[in-house]
Image: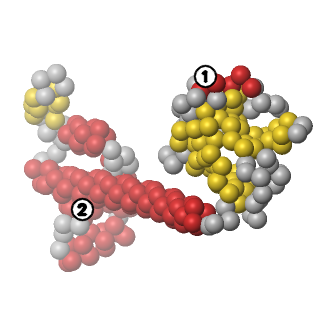
């Protein structure tokens, strides 16, 4: 048997591409067991196809096609994109085998691209699902807050204290809803302007005689909170409430020159 002629015939490329009949496949398989040269050629063809499909990006797909063309002895002119045919390395039967290999290669590239697109779609869906779950959780939280506020507004035992604008900030206003049993206040600051950059509003509980301020914290989320209503713990026996503008991070004692609002609780 002329092994070289058999290899050059292109039938091995068709075998790798799966383009032979069952009988032909069995014949090639038997010859592979009998002749190491044929087995080695089949392994090399399979290895070449694996290399061609190793990278499945669009740019590398084009590169793979160029490699295939060069393997078939085409000359690729990058500047004019004109393909000219030089002296072929194989006979027409060999081209038939390579054509089958090319079809298999492009099929593998297409399948890999489709898999990558599917993975990308799944990742996008998962991301959107996570975002939706977060939005639903926020909505539930907002609903719970709304229910709490409604119950506070309707509770006759809640003390309401208006905080009026002071001095240069006479147009400012706020309101405290004091739940003494729960030791908390709900502070409505919709009547305050946006604080300048680098500053923050600070809330104070006051006793009047002697005047003693106790900080209830800073309104760090003032700008981002749409409702401008804040729930604040207040375990103090407050007689009044005030809001000052302080440097970012707050102050140990209120800056009276920046006292925006003040309100006195009615004696009980």
SS category of the residue bearing label 2: helix
Name the residue located 74 percent from the left edge and 26 percent from the top edge.
Answer: 256
Q: Is residue 50 left or right of residue 86?
A: right
Picture layout, residue 211 above or below residue 13: above
Give the left or right position of residue 219, taking residue 134 as reference: right
Instruction: Give above or below for 239 relative to 155.
Output: above
Q: Which numbered marker is on residue 241?
A: none
Q: Residues within 10 Å of mark 1 (few under 14, many from 20)?
A: few
Query: In the rendered view, does 88 fall on the left or right side of 29?
Result: left
Farthest residue toward the right?
210
| Residue 130 x, y percent position in the rendering | 47, 59
Would residue 15 be visible to someone looking at this image? yes
Q: Quadrant of the C terminus?
A: bottom right
Image position, residue 212 (x, y; %): 86, 38
The quarter holding residue 154 reads: bottom right
Could you give the CA–CA distance between mark 2 and mark 1, rounded to whole angstroms?
86 Å
Residue shown at 16% from the left, 31% from the top: 75
Viewer-nearest of discs 2 and 1: 1
Name the residue beneath numbered marker 1. 168
**The quadrant where residue 24 appears:** bottom left
Foreground residue, 138 or 244? 244
Image quarter of residue 76: top left
Which mark is first along the chain, 1 or 2?
A: 2
Asked if residue 144 can be seen in this view, the reply is no
Question: Label 2 belongs to which residue?
Answer: 17
């Amino acid at each position: 048997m002329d092994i070289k002629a058999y290899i050059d015939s292109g039938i091995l490329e068709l075998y790798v591409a799966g383009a032979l009949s069952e009988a032909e496949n069995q014949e090639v398989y038997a010859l592979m067991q009998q002749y190491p040269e044929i087995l080695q050629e089949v392994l090399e063809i399979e290895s070449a196809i694996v290399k061609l499909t190793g990278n499945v990006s669009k740019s590398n797909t084009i590169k793979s096609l160029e490699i295939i063309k060069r393997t078939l002895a085409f000359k690729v002119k990058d500047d004019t994109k004109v393909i000219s045919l030089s002296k072929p390395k194989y006979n027409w039967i060999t081209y038939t085998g390579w054509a089958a290999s090319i079809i298999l290669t492009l099929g593998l590239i297409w399948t890999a691209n489709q898999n990558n697109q599917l993975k990308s779609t799944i990742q996008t869906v998962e991301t959107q699902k996570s975002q939706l779950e977060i939005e639903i959780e926020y909505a539930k939280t907002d609903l719970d807050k709304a229910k709490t506020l409604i119950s506070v507004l309707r509770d006759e035992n809640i003390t309401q204290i208006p905080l009026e604008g002071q001095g240069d900030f006479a147009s400012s206003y706020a309101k405290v809803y004091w739940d003494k049993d729960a030791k908390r206040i709900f502070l409505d600051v919709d009547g305050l302007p946006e604080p300048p950059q680098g500053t923050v509003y600070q809330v104070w509980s006051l006793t009047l005689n002697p005047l003693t301020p106790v900080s209830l914290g800073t309104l760090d989320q003032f700008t981002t909170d749409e409702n401008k209503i804040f729930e604040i713990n207040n375990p103090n026996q407050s007689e009044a409430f005030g809001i000052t503008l302080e440097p970012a991070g707050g102050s140990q004692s209120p800056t009276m020159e920046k006292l925006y609002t003040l309100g006195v609780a009615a004696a009980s």
